[in-house]
Image (cartoon, rainbow, N blue to C red):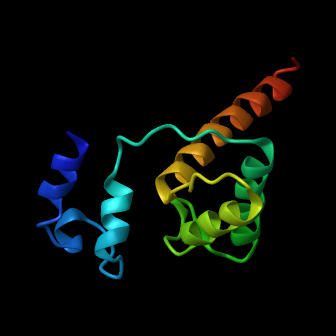
Amino acid sequence: MCADFITSMEKYSPEELGFIAKNSKDDISQSMKKCQDPARWVAAEEATIITTLLLQKAAGNSSESGFKLAVWPLVVDAVREATSDTVKKTLQHCKTCHHRVHAQLSICAHAVADGF
């Protein structure tokens, strides 16, 4: 079902889909994939994502709405270098992991602020 959806969406240009024009067709297809097998993460990979994103934020590669598109391939490469796993983590896997870890850290920060 996902493959059919992705195939049907590939006929649209990046502009019609609301993506920045410099994205390649492969990047668009990859970022549109929602039905991927869940990735297994180890602490070192999660730490690599956080470290890479913090460095990119310090370098000015983020805004109020999130990280610039050019940051995510750097994250994928950093995770690939940090793991011995033969399963490749995709851009979507890395974004999903980041959102999960970010949510967990937000909950912890609120708990600490509330005196727990």
In this view of the protein, which residue sits in the foreground, 99 or 88? 88
The residue positioned farthest toward the right in the image shown: 115
The spot of residue 10 in percent (x, y) is 17, 64
Q: Horizontally, is 54 left or right of 86 in the view?
A: right
What quarter of the picture does the N terminus occupy?
A: top left
In this view of the protein, which residue sits in the foreground, 6 or 53? 6
In this view of the protein, which residue sits in the foreground, 89 or 100? 89
Q: Horizontally, is 78 left or right of 4 in the view?
A: right
- Residue 104 in which image quadrant: top right
- Examine the rendered structure and indicate whether residue 116 appears above or below residue 101: above
Kindly identify the residue that appears in the image at 33 percent across and 74 percent down. 20
- Examine the rendered structure and indicate whether residue 29 appears above or below residue 69: above
- Residue 17 in which image quadrant: bottom left
Kindly identify the residue that appears in the image at 66 percent across and 63 percent down. 80
The residue positioned farthest toward the front in the image shown: 86
Q: Horizontally, is 34 left or right of 37 in the view?
A: left
The spot of residue 19 in percent (x, y) is 30, 68
The spot of residue 71 in percent (x, y) is 58, 71
Task: Report the number of numbered marks.
Answer: 0
What quarter of the picture does the C terminus occupy?
A: top right
The residue positioned farthest toward the bottom in the image shown: 22
- Residue 16 in which image quadrant: bottom left
- Examine the rendered structure and indicate whether residue 78 appears above or below residue 95: below
The residue positioned farthest toward the top in the image shown: 116
In this view of the protein, which residue sits in the foreground, 36 or 9? 36
Kindly identify the residue that appears in the image at 73 percent across and 64 percent down. 52
The spot of residue 48 in percent (x, y) is 76, 57
